[in-house]
Amino acid sequence: MNPFHASVSTLKGVGSVKQKALLKMNIRTLEDLIYCFPRDYEDRRNRLPIARLTPGSAAVVRAAVVSYERLSNSRNGKSQLELTVKDDTGVLKILFFNASYVAKVFEQGGEFFFYGKIVGGFKEIKMLHPDFSKADEGEGRDILPVYPLTAGISQKDMRKWMESLLPMIAYIDEYLPPASIERNRICGIAYALENIHFPTTRQKFKEARYRLVFEELLLLYTGLKTAKMARINESGIAFERDVDMEAFKKALPFRLTEAQSRVLSEICLDMESAGTMNRLIQGDVGSGKTAVAAAAIYKAVKSGFQTVMMAPTETLAKQHYNDFTELFGGLGMKVGFLSGNLKASERIAALEDLCSGETDILIGTHALIQPDVIFARLGLVITDEQHRFGVSQRIRLSQKGKSPDILVMTATPIPRTLGFIIYGDLDISSIDERPPGRLPVITKAVRGNKRNAAYEFVRKEVGLGNQAYIVAPSIDENEGSDLKSAAGIYEELQSRFREFSVAMIHGRMKQSDKDKIMGDFAAGQIQVLVSTVLIEVGINVPTATIMLVENAERFGLAQLHQLRGRVGRGKRQSCCILICENDSEDARERINIMLASDDGFKIAEKDLELRGPGEFFGMKQHGIPGMRMANLLKHVKVLNAVKEETAALLAEDPELLKLENNNFAKKIESMFISAGEIGI
């Protein structure tokens, strides 16, 4: 048995309390622990005397504690701790935020190493919330790791535990193929783990980091490529080639754009092939993805198969149901609906029609993946707003048929550099053209002191017969926070806009209540809808022309673009107003991007640059393993090397069945299974 599979509780000093704290860091086993890499390093070789500290840089200082004082923050009620420390050259103030628990660690006269950022001006400088250790800790090491922590776990704990694991590292099995290690001149896993935690030189650290970045990307990329190859080679449904698609196009109330026609051609080729289609359609809100999906549905039904479309909300599912009933009813096809809120009798009838084959097209929510949902002959599976679903949900829905074709749609454009990570098992089609006749949404940004003027503009527009969305970052007021809340805005607007119907919608409401409000808004019975980001994915309301976002600086760029896409869906000129309370450089940069572009793909690229790939679009939702070391912005060259290595590996051993690739294949499988993805 691999000793690293043992629980962290086997370590000296890890009792039940420490074990629970480590669990918050997703650390359960010794392997989880050794793969918890440092976020920084305390380089004691480069420590500076206090007199030479300069603002704006991080530094290591060895100093003795003179005194400490607890300070209260009247704004949020949280306490701060201010230390006064000194060395032979001067005195330094050190500030800890909401960390009064550290006070008991410091004793007058005790010597410590402090590692943190220096701030301040000419007269006084301070070090903010540094990492620290007693001067006699870590003796013999010049470079100490600085780990991410949680309450109850200290740097001393982490360093002690990692030290205790060092003798075991030599017994870790190497799982990268020997050929990959040799071709790319990378170090072994034992060397990498030792030198990522306790490097003795910069060169050894760089070698260790390169190996771990390379390994992470190679496992991920090879796993995705292998899954894709298996899917391509899988026998699927070959749909009819001679389906009269022109009959479908004539039934549409508009002409398809060139981009829609191009993507439809790609889909038709996939559907007619003997393999299984796994294709993503991505495009901005309003680019016409649903019309292309409807064309694929028409082809599937005309070929004698049923289709299913899953949407993330009942409101959106019902919109699709209503639109498809109108479109396909005239083409002789029956559309069914299924959600968790149907009456028992309605659900039974829907399931009977589906099982008998009477229903050609089924639209619904997560209720579609329940065991009692049985199709007569499922041929095509479609998921809308795919970023709201996990990979496992898509797979469970597809398992209701025998190798059905899969089409997924998202209005969240993915940067090319992330496309293969998030949708690595899919072929990607992009609709990068707006339907003709749509006016671009005018975007304006105003400071908080112009809020009243912004709301008067809303009053004027709504008075002309338009409708408005008002979006807030939170549902309720938070004590000590200056964020606007939906509840507070709703109360204010009921008084401010007495001549209009104002309603509020948020995620804690019952689904039936949300559906009624959205239905009333779509019907024009509500003029102003106050909401959280719930309406980021919403129904099509052509008369909604105003999107006002409070605390816009608190939203991601992609999220703001999605919100903006809720308006501008009719023939009237629409406007998006971003109210910003924060005037920081970062906030200004992000808002300026929104003002300069309405191209979702460009905005997605900028969002990636600003936020990094780690949490981009909530990557954990997709069932794709997270990255501990790799950064797709910084490691483009490594990624290119990984692509070449994957091609070489799979050319020699397409299914990774050779003995020397056995550990590598097992590692890929365990990594993807733990992330909720299918094994290879």
Image (spheres, rainbow, N blue to C red):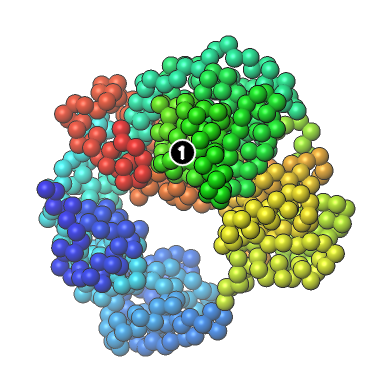
Q: Residue furthest right?
A: 464
Regarding residue 575, the answer to whether it shows in the image is no
Q: From the viewer's perspective, is 617 left or right of 587?
A: left
Q: Which residue is mark 1?
A: 373
* Observer-nearest of 118 and 28: 28
Quick one: label 1, few (<14), some, or many (20+) residues within 10 Å? some
Regarding residue 504, the answer to whether it shows in the image is yes
Label 1: which secondary element: loop
- Locate residue 372, reporting x and y percent: 43, 40
- Classify residue 503 by image quadrant: bottom right
* Observer-nearest of 55 and 679: 679
- Classify residue 274 by image quadrant: top left
At a point 28% along the width and 23% down the height, the residue shown is 654
* Observer-nearest of 74 and 385: 385
- Locate residue 605, reporting x and y percent: 56, 42
At a point 41% along the width and 65% down the height, the residue shown is 58
- Locate residue 413, reporting x and y percent: 57, 39
**Amino acid beneath label 1:** Val
Query: Up-down: is 71 above or below 52?
Result: below
Query: Up-down: is 422 above or below 432?
Result: below
At a point 58% along the width and 11% down the height, the residue shown is 242
At a point 76% along the width and 62% down the height, the residue shown is 502
Q: Residue furthest front?
A: 345
